Image (tube, rainbow, N blue to C red):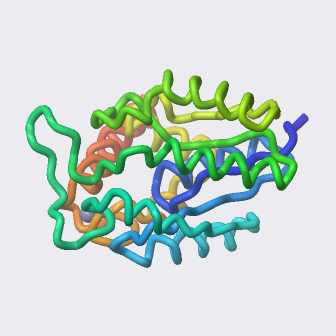
Amino acid sequence: MKMEKAVVVFSGGQDSTTCLFWALKQFAEVEAVTFDYGQRHRLEIEVASAIAKELHVPHTVLDMSLLNQLAPNALTRSEIAIEQKEGQLPSTFVDGRNLLFLSFAAVLAKQKGARHLVTGVCETDFSGYPDCRDIFIKSLNVTLNLAMDYQFVIHTPLMWLTKAQTWKLADELGAFEFVRTKTLTCYNGIIADGCGECPACVLRRRGLEEYMKEKEGITQL
Ligand code: ZN
């Protein structure tokens, strides 16, 4: 039997779209929430809305422009280059982003009678983002339960997966083509396979190639 109701933190990218398909398999009812924090590419919000609509998932877009006001970064300001210097966090890092997103998602979820929160954070391809770590998610889960006197469960289906394994999961969920052709991961705002050059595209393609190779090997056996 499917479990209760879940709210998925959803950006319209590969990871959160895979999580959305995962949630649709696990839960009786699923909603999605997207945060508008002044992303460079407005297309991100449109892509998220279009995917939610196509999958018949109720979708809420929350204004989080204060995040951009607090912490200008490469995801919101076109004059800041996307880069990662040796031993430093990439310029796309926003302090407290997952803390804020998950906390706001939890407030929304409680109002909607959902205990389950789903997020695509991942520790494996860890770029040094401290609030993507499993220990942070577990700590926040306890904090949210205490803050709202409610038994939230934060699910992180991608936490220990490589990018190739995330493609595999999408495939197992029957969503491989959907994720490949309809999601937006590229920092330059190009849907599907993207620009091919930005760090997000490189990571996505490397994972895809690795998975395709593995899949070919299996089909040939
Ligand atoms: Zn790109």
- 216 lies above or below 93: above
- 203 lies above or below 31: above
Residue 74 position within the rendered picture, expressed as x and y whole percent measured from the top left: 25, 61
Residue in front for this viewpoint, 112 or 13: 112
Quadrant of ligand 1: it is bottom left
Residue 208 position within the rendered picture, expressed as x and y whole percent measured from the top left: 35, 47
Q: Residue at x 28, y 37 (%)?
A: 127
Q: Residue at x 36, y 45 (%)?
A: 95
Residue 220 in sight in this render: no
Q: Quadrant of the N terminus?
A: top right
Query: Left or right: where does residue 93 sit relative to residue 45?
Result: left
Residue in front for this viewpoint, 133 or 214: 133
Query: Left or right: where does residue 110 sit relative to residue 127?
Result: right
Residue 115 position within the rendered picture, expressed as x and y whole percent measured from the top left: 80, 39
Q: Quadrant of the C terminus?
A: top left
- 194 lies above or below 100: below
Residue in front for this viewpoint, 190 or 137: 137
Q: Residue at x 30, y 45 (%)?
A: 209
Residue 138 position within the rendered picture, expressed as x and y whole percent measured from the top left: 58, 24
Residue 152 in sight in this render: yes
Q: Residue at x 45, y 30 (%)?
A: 161
**Could you say which quadrant of the image residue 149 lies in?**
top right
Identity of the residue furthest to the left in this view: 86
Query: Left or right: where does residue 138 sit relative to residue 165?
Result: right
Identity of the residue furthest to the right in this view: 1
- Total count of labels: 0
